[in-house]
Amino acid sequence: MGCVCCKPSAIEDSKESPRVPSKTSSDLRASREGLSRREEACHSKNRYSNLSDGRGISIEKQTNRSVRLHADTFERNREKMEHVVAQHPAIGIIPKASEGEHVAAGWPPWLAAVAGEAIKGWLPRRADSFEKLDKIGQGTYSNVYRACDLEKRKIVALKKVRFDNLEPESVRFMAREIHILRRLDHPNVIKLEGLVTSRMSCSLYLVFEYMEHDLAGLASHPGLKFTETQVKCYMQQLLHGLDHCHSRGVLHRDIKGSNLLIDNNGILKIADFGLASFYDPHQNHPLTSRVVTLWYRPPELLLGATYYGTAVDLWSTGCIIAELYAGKPIMPGRTEVEQLHKIFKLCGSPSEDYWRKSKLPHATIFKPQQPYRRCVGETFKDFPAPALDLVETLLSIDPADRGSAASALKSEFFTTSPLPCDPSSLPKYPPSKEFDAKLRDEEARRQRAAGNRGQRPDHERRGDRESRAIPAPDANAELVASIKKRHFQSNSKSRSEKFNPHPEDVASGFPIDPPRPSHAAEASVDPQGPPHSRASHSGPLTNRATWAKEVRKSDKFSSGTHKVSSRVPTGMDLPPDDRMGRPITLQSEMPKLIGRFPGSFKETSESLIKDQRHPLQGFHNKEEGKSSNKDPILLGYGSMGHKIHYSGPLIVPSVNMDQMLKEQDRHIQETVRRARLDKAKAWKAQTQLSATSLFVSGR
Ligand SMILES: Nc1ncnc2c1ncn2[C@@H]1O[C@H](COP(=O)(O)OP(=O)(O)OP(=O)(O)O)[C@@H](O)[C@H]1O
């Protein structure tokens, strides 16, 4: 039997598992309590690993001599650079280097060429100084693994980012996350400890401290309920981390439970800076409004704001605090329109003054004819007063009224009894991530499908549903889904994987994820809940390259004070997909609609006034046939299992929203039907063809 360290884990099961020397039994001695045998191996002296970098694998796998020579030269250069580092007083820091020097230091040319700032002063870590253990998370642009850092002898998280190394824009986009992370240094912000790549490699891993939990996973864990002091403890840490980001000029732009990682000591760290951006406090540089996961997205972004600031993160924080008290997401919208509707129903619609001064791009379309009344206090009347006060402030419609992370930290919520507990006093939980909850949920669903559906008592089924994690639709789910569709049509593999098979993945047993078909349809009609984070389930078909291309099409890259690309939209809406993966947006549908229903927006709204309805009031609860305005704000949550609506045309003369949605549904069904027919025809033709050829060939 091989050593524990070498024994391939589930994800490392590969025919190409490396040949690693066996270890003696003494190597397997337990050195730390609570660590698995594989983890112990990480802390042992064994330097062998089944993870090796692109350079090593290329040499081993390829017989190409020039590659060998190249690698030798690289190794010599690397030694030189390591010598420089050794001479330098700050270990690991090398003086500002040029592109050539970066390459000499071991960075791949594609990275050195465009992301000098992000790698400045660092040396790449070698892949063979890590051993992958298991996959612990999956994001839109990444797969995350637990791994042993064999040099530092500790457990880390390796985030393998997806991008196209042949596309400078894609690399730049990916490098922005690194650059931002390196600007931040705070106990409540995840620490980027290094980068794993090599001169010959096409891939890149970000090395992070390992965090056992995330807030979404803990909050959705069956039977786990936070006390008030615990909620305060987590929220205090979140606000401290945010305060640090904001003070360093960074907007996170995707604050949500699954991005708040928590370690076994109760320390919360803000993670996933993939959508983060440097911002200009004077708001002179426009940014894209298509950020922040829908349920946590503030109204100004839904209304198309491109000049915004720290208040966007504060809105998301308000949603999270309320969610922790309410025990479920407070505004689980399925489309942007529905999200805005939910916000208006709970927080009231913007004041006349705000509409006037904000000049938001989508104001004409979304401004209700009659204002919505704010009912945060009534809805959350069971919350303790200081909690409610803070939620009221953070969920202010006008971003200027949300205050700052620093002012929130001074609020009564944190200064009155019960005070936030000490993180170290928090209970130790079993590893718990949104990802685990999704797996749990999938497993439960598989088991149900396997046979006992309908046989279990009702209350048990309800229990499942209540305990399941409710992943929020990802920030870019709409964009990603449409990109995925387009990409899938033209290309069955992401460019980086198609043209640059990662040798280290293949040869070290690192799995290359198989391309997956778009399952937007199944995801969006999931009767168990809201459309899942389609983005977070996206396979390699979605990569940063396509994303960057899309963003670039819509955004101008402004070289702000920080010389970092900020993204600004130019009117291209980034759409949610319908069941066919076809983007449906107000913008995309508008020309068609205008063609179909000649008339102006003005006429439309006038006709709606005549009907005594405005577009948002027109939303109806299909089941009850009543205006959903009467629904308690959380009804949306309870009704998630009902028929899914898709965001679509908003303005159709003389019809209310319900009719428009019906029209949209009908349109979708028609498209699905046509697609089925086409498929059937194609199949028939093909069968006839093969029958003919069989006949002709006489077989
Ligand atoms: N340092 C870490 N320790 C443990 N788990 C982590 C760590 N970093 C990330 N993860 C896990 O991996 C998941 C994906 O990571 P992350 O959110 O950074 O990726 P992403 O591709 O940017 O995702 P998103 O789709 O949210 O933009 C996280 O939700 C988390 O569960």
Image (cartoon, rainbow, N blue to C red):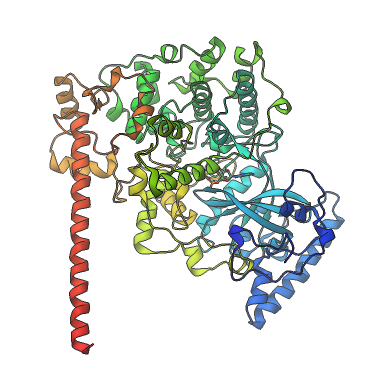
Tell me if residue 625 comes above or below residue 652 in the rendering.
Answer: above
Q: Nearer the viewer, residue 529 or 615?
A: 529
Tell me if residue 201 comes above or below residue 88 in the rendering.
Answer: below
Task: Where is residue 627? Give x, y as percent.
Answer: 24, 21
Q: Nearer the viewer, residue 107 or 316?
A: 316
Task: Where is residue 540? Give x, y as percent.
Answer: 47, 58
Say left or right for 602 vs 319: left
Visible residue check, residue 8? yes
Q: Quarter-wise, where is residue 412 in the image?
A: top right
At 37% from the left and 16% from the top, the residue drawn is: 353
Q: Nearer the viewer, residue 286 or 139?
A: 139
Q: Quadrant of ligand 1?
A: top right
Residue found at the far bottom of this picture: 698
Tell me if residue 425 comes above or below residue 576 in the rendering.
Answer: above
Task: Where is residue 428? Give x, y as percent.
Answer: 68, 32
At 65% from the left and 36% from the top, the residue drawn is: 189
At 13% from the left and 38% from the top, the residue drawn is: 597
Task: Where is residue 572? Give x, y as percent.
Answer: 35, 44
At 18% from the left and 48% from the top, the residue drawn is: 670
Say left or right for 104 vs 401: right
Say left or right for 537 vs 187: left
Visible residue check, residue 572? no
Q: Nearer the viewer, residue 101 or 179?
A: 179
Q: Quadrant of the N terminus?
A: bottom right
